[in-house]
Image (cartoon, helix red, strand yellow):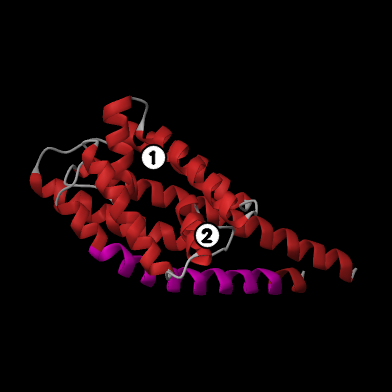
Amino acid sequence: MRGLQTEKQTDFRLLFRWGIFIIGLIIMSLGISLTILAGLGSAPWDVLHIGLTEQLGLTVGTWTIIMGFLLLVAATILTKEKPKLGAYLNMLLVGLFVDFFLFVLPQPDVLLVQALMLTAGILVMGFGIGVYISPQCGAGPRDSLMLAVAERTRFTVAQVRVTMEVIVLFFGWLLGGPVFIGTILFSLTIGHVTGVSLTWCRTWVDRRMERGIKIENIN
């Protein structure tokens, strides 16, 4: 009886964690799409993806997947460890979701609406990042490479992240990606938004999992 109860608790934890993870990816992808559609400048990695789309074709989501795959390969080479399942799902699903939202959502041409969409995109993306990280199902491709480089060098995680963002932004700009006020606003605010979101989401996820286990024990 106790073994069956433990198995049910494990199943609940597993389903809950992966469900929250996927919901977080959807929310984050919506935020990415909103910042792109706002047309006031995108996040550094999206600048690169859009620049690649402009120069070589394919969709923004497809380039998100391709670049994610290359980053995972690089992280695997550095760490000599295979990434977690969450990293692969992040790579694939974010690209698919971004393409979906870019296809169904309208692109505004009024400055006020663009500004509102940009602000909403940053808030939604930061919230989505907090949601998908909170169940701890694995870091995304960019974070996987960032952690791998930090472990193999004397640089801190923050230094590696900033360096990666600057390099990516530079090449994205060379390819014609949209660098504008939104890029600066994103860079200055996304860390704070994500920090608040992650704290709240981790607390909520932990409480929900504890509550679910208590309900299973009662039953």
Report the side of 35 relative to 88 (left or right): left
Name the residue at 50% across, 44% down. 91
**Quadrant assignment, res 21:** bottom right
Magenta span main SS: helix
Q: Quadrant of the image for the N terminus?
A: bottom right
Q: Quadrant of the image for the C terminus?
A: bottom right
Report the side of 167 relative to 217 (left or right): left
The front one of 67 and 188 is 67
Name the residue at 38% across, 34% down. 99
Compared with 32, 217 (above or below) is below
Name the residue at 16% across, 38% down. 108
* Residue 177 visible somewhere in the drawing: no
Q: Amino acid at mark 1?
A: Val
Where residue 171 sits in the image (x, y, percent)?
A: 28, 43
The front one of 171 and 110 is 171
Residue 170 highlighted magenta (yes or no):
no
In the image, farthest residue toward the left:
111
Q: Earlier in the sequence, mark 1 or mark 2?
A: 1
- Pointers 1 and 2 in contact (CB under 8 A)? no
Residue underneath mark 1: 98
Where residue 178 sits in the image (x, y, percent)?
A: 20, 42
Q: Amino acid at mark 2?
A: Ala
Part of the protein shown in magenta? 188-214
Q: Residues within 10 Å of mark 1 (few under 14, many from 20)?
A: many
Where residue 144 sits in the image (x, y, percent)?
A: 51, 56
Residue underneath mark 2: 148
User: In what element is the residue under mark 2?
Assistant: helix
Compared with 56, 86 (above or below) is below
**Quadrant assignment, res 129:** bottom left
